Image (cartoon, grey):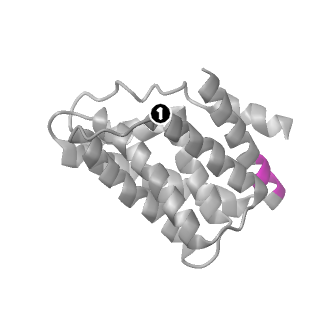
Amino acid sequence: MKRILIATLLALPGPSFAHGLHDGGTLLSGALHPVSGADHVLAMLAVGLLAAQMAGRAVWLLPLSFVAAMLGGGAMGAAGIGFPAVEPMILASIMILGVLVALAARLPVPALVAMVAVFGLAHGWAHGAEGPASGLVLYAGGFAGATMLLHLAGIALGRLMPMVALRGLGAGTALAGFALAMV
């Protein structure tokens, strides 16, 4: 467990360095946002890890709900609509999703979808609020595509790992979220 946590923390990009990498409304600048900040990477991989523990259509409902809500949140952020406590919500998403993976929690699918959508809304708001003044559609396409790839990577990783390692990675994710909250 300790080795998984250390490996997770060493593999993380610096905290929230995604903020400020937007040099225009391009697919590339949008795709860079979710993959260049530990807060986003951890949460989006955790959605995939959680989905990997599910069966049937829940495997796809979780990531698709996150991305759909994220696009809505991005539009809200770009429009200047407020979202109180967005950063604490983003950090909470990492910790809560990590704990759910670590516990191999079996919550009802509608509850998981709703929770993941709220987290997606918060992450999307951050993307949209920090996005470019023009070219928002291309930018949103970039951050939605990169997010889905992170979700798919989490699903693939979760399906390839033994359950004990997957649960350990969930615990490491939750602890990394806690560490980010302390920074």
Q: Is residue 84 magenta?
A: no
Q: Is residue 167 magenta?
A: yes
Indicate the amino acid at tag 1: Glu
Residue at numbered disc 1: 87
Which residue is found at the position 16% from the left and 41% from the top? 135
Q: Position of residue 25 (x, y in %)?
A: 21, 38
Q: Residue furthest left?
A: 134
Magenta span dominant secondary structure = helix
- Quarter holding the C terminus is top right
Count of labels in the image: 1
Determine whether 130 is above or below 58 in the image: above
Q: Is residue 145 left or right of residue 61?
A: left
Which residue is found at the position 20% from the left and 49% from the top? 137
Q: Is residue 45 left or right of residue 20?
A: right
Q: Position of residue 59 (x, y in %)?
A: 57, 70
Q: Quadrant of residue 9?
A: top right
Mark 1 element type: helix
Q: Position of residue 156 (x, y in %)?
A: 61, 60
Identify the magenta region.
164-168
Q: Position of residue 179 (x, y in %)?
A: 67, 28
Which residue is found at the position 28% from the left and 51% from the top? 141
Q: Quadrant of residue 158?
A: bottom right
Q: Residue furthest bottom?
A: 56
- Classed neighbour count for the residue bearing mark 1: other residues with Cα under 10 Å, few (<14), some (14–19), many (≥20): some
- Quarter holding the N terminus is top right
Which residue is found at the position 76% from the left and 36% from the top? 5
